[in-house]
Amino acid sequence: AQTVTQSQPEMSVQEAETVTLSCTYDTSESDYYLFWYKQPPSRQMILVIRQEAYKQQNATENRFSVNFQKAAKSFSLKISDSQLGDAAMYFCAKRMDSSYKLIFGSGTRLLVRP
Amino acid sequence: DTGVSQDPRHKITKRGQNVTFRCDPISEHNRLYWYRQTLGQGPEFLTYFQNEAQLEKSRLLSDRFSAERPKGSFSTLEIQRTEQGDSAMYLCASSSTVSSVDTQYFGPGTRLTVL
């Protein structure tokens, strides 16, 4: 079974500091895609960043970057210069090359302290 | 580009009633997905369409659930004889085959409460 594991139910970070959210996954495929989505309270899910497994270079989007370790099946999200608006549930998700469905982890709630 | 829209945003129903939700994808997106999200969990895949064809269904989609996308544009998800266990957020997403990554963009969801 394909699984995505987020072992941190909740994380807390001081405003302007850096935080890393962990994600590991299970797969037997060599080609797949990984995503981090953000879901603010009572608001819709939005894409934060994505990574293609065949690309060795880690993806970066402004203050958000990933540490993709293919051999370890690890895909962590680093948020730099944390802002109050970053407070949300963060979900890691994987899509296989052979299927278009997303498999999500259970999420990490990020709290940002002013 | 107006984004994915879903209607209604909230639905309260009594056990045993039928409910129907609608999803309008981003225009020109030919793939449409339905997910279910219960409190404190990540979304779980239900089904997806490419144009009007339903290409994959999860075993979560019992025979009380049916989804359609008759003209390859909007989609409906119907739940018959609702049960309290059906209470959840139902999310719709869409994507385009033009993009090799096929990123899915989500709507705001329909929150279903079954009394």
Image: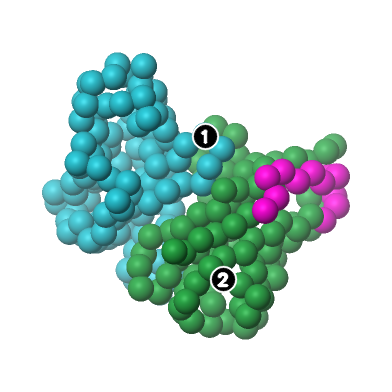
Chain colours: A green, B cyan
Q: Can residue A70 be seen in this view?
A: yes
Which residue type carries mark 1? Leu
Task: Answer with left or right where residue A13 lies relative to residue B73.
Answer: right
**Chain ID at mark 1:** B
Which residue type carries mark 2? Gln
Q: Residue at x 59, y 34 (%)?
A: A41
Q: What element carries label 2?
A: strand
Q: Does the magenta stretch include residue A50?
A: no
Q: Where is residue B28 in the image (x, y as percent from the top left)?
A: 29, 58
Q: Distance between the residues labelled 2 and 1?
A: 27 Å
User: Toward the viewer: B89 or A65?
Assistant: B89
Q: Which residue is drawn at 35% across and 37% down?
A: B6
User: Toward the viewer: B52 or B80?
Assistant: B80
> What crowding class fits label 1: few (fewer than 14 Cα within 10 Å), some (14-19), or many (20 or more)?
few
- The region drawn magenta spans A7-18
**Residue A29 image label:** none
According to the picture, the residue beneath numbered tag 2 turns out to be A51
Q: Which residue is drawn at 71% across and 56% down?
A: A21
- The mark closer to the camera, 2 or 1, is 1
According to the picture, the residue beneath numbered tag 1 turns out to be B39
Task: Answer with left or right where residue B75 lies relative to residue B88.
Answer: left
The image quadrant that residue B19 belongs to is top left
Q: Residue at x 43, y 70 (%)?
A: A96
